[in-house]
Amino acid sequence: MRILLVGEYSGFHNSLKHGLVQLGHEVTIIGDGDGFKKFPVDIDISTDYFTSSWLRQKIRVGWYKLTGNDLQDRLKLARFRESGILNNHYDIVQFINSNSFNCGPDIEKEMMSSLLEKADKAFLVACGDDYHYAHYITTSHKGYSIINPEPDKPELRQEFPYTMKYLQDDYKQNYLWLLNQCEAIIPSHTDFKMALHNEPKATDIIPSAVQIDKFELNQNQDFKTIEIFMGINRHNYLKKGIPYFEKALEIIRDKYNSRVNITIAEDLPYEQYMKSYNKAHIFLDQVLSYDQGYNALEAMAQGKVVFAGAGKEFLETYDLEKSPLIDAQPDVEYLVNQLSQFIEHPKAILELGKEARKFILEHHDAVAIAKQFEEKHFNIG
C-alpha cells in the first residue's frame, strides 16, 4: 500500500513508518519537524524565514495583529503546494492531529482537505493534545492532569494555551470535521483512551511504535556516582510536572552530594537530546500523565529506570501486575523516596531497567505495531 503519514511529534510517525516499510509498504511523512526538535520528515514544509530575522519577525507579528493572518502559515502553505504531494494518490492517509502542521485553522483545513481528496481511507491518531483530550480534562476527568499541576492554583490553566486552543470554536470544528472524514481515531496510550471513552469512532489502543533495532541495552554499571537525567522542553514545562522533579532533585542533591550527578537538558534537537542521556541510570520523564511519553519509551528500550505515568490505569491497559517503571506521582516526598531507593540500592537499577526493555520489546516493537495498524485498520473493507 501507499501510505501518507501527516505530521510528526516525538518520532511517533518515523517509528511507525519503519515498521510499515518492513512490511513492504511505501510510506511518506509530511510535516514541519515539530519546531526546534527537527524530527526527520520526507516532505518538509517548515520555514524559518521569519523566525531567523528580528525584522521579519516584527513584520510577521505586526501583520498578525493587523489582519489576524500569520505570514509564516502562508509560507508553509506555499511549500505544501510546491512539494508535489498533491500529485500522488494514497491508499491510506493518517493524521497525527487535526493541527498536524501547526498552522491556523483556516490554513490547516485547506491542507487537510487537499490530502483527503488524494486518499482512499483516512485515519486520525490520538497521541497528543486535541479537542477530545482538552474537553475531557477540563470537564469530567478526576485526578491530576497536565492543566492542573497544582490543584490549589486553578489560575495556572492560563499557562496552557497550546492545550486550551483546541476548545476554541475554529480548532474544535476542524477536529470534529476531520474526525468525521476518518474511518477511526486510534489512541496511542492510556491518557487518550481515557479521553475517548464515549467516542464511537475510537478504537482500542495501539501503542506507540519504537524502532527497537536503534537501541541496544545500554546500562551504566558504574555506580560510584548515580547519573540522573531530566529533559526540559519549556513549552511543556508545567504540563510535564517538571517543578515536582526539580524540587525532588534539590533535596536529592543536598542529601547525597557527590553520590549523584544530575544532568538537565533543555530545548535540544532530537539527535542531541538522545546523546545527552547516554550515561544515565535514571531518566525523569513526566509526572502528570497516566502513561509514558515517547522519550521515555526510547529510554526504557535502552534499559534505563524511567519515572513517568505507570499507575493503576496503565497496568490495566497492558494487563500487568507489576510496572516496568516508576509511577511518577505529583508528590515531592514520594519522588524523593523513590529516587533514594535506587541511589542506596543501585543493583535495583539494572533489574528494573531490564524489565523496562522487556516491556518495550513485548508491547512497542515497531514491526509488531505496524502489523496491528495493517491488520486492524488499514485493510478494512
Image (cartoon, rainbow, N blue to C red):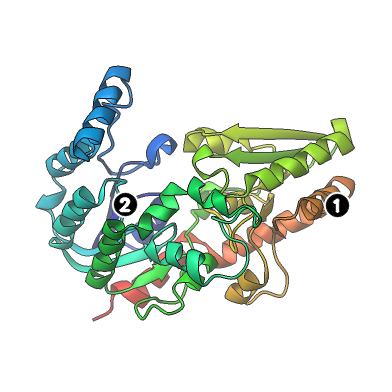
Is residue 10 at least partly visible in the picture? no
In the rendered structure, the answer to whether residue 138 lies left or right of residue 348 reads left
In the rendered structure, the answer to whether residue 324 lies left or right of residue 138 reads right
202 or 259, nearer to the observer: 202
In the rendered structure, the answer to whether residue 182 lies left or right of residue 363 reads left
Label 1 SS:
helix
Q: Disc 1 residue type?
A: Gln
Which quadrant of the rendered structure holds the C terminus?
bottom left
Question: Which residue is rendered at x = 69% and y = 37% of the image?
Answer: 279
319 or 248, nearer to the observer: 248
Label 2 SS:
loop
310 or 169, nearer to the observer: 169
Is residue 147 at least partly visible in the picture? yes
Q: Which mark is residue 3?
A: none
Q: What is the x, y in percent for residue 196?
A: 44, 73
Classify 10 Å Cα crowding around label 2: few (below 14), some (14-19), many (20 and above). Answer: some
Q: Which residue is mark 1?
A: 341
Q: What is the x, y in percent for residue 18?
A: 39, 54
Q: Disc 2 residue type?
A: Ser
Farthest residue in the left direction? Answer: 87
Question: Which residue is rendered at x = 12% and y = 62% of the image?
Answer: 117
Q: Which residue is mark 2?
A: 100
In the rendered structure, the answer to whether residue 198 lies left or right of residue 244 reads left
Q: What is the x, y in percent for residue 289?
A: 59, 59
Question: Which residue is rendered at x = 58% and y = 74% of the image?
Answer: 317
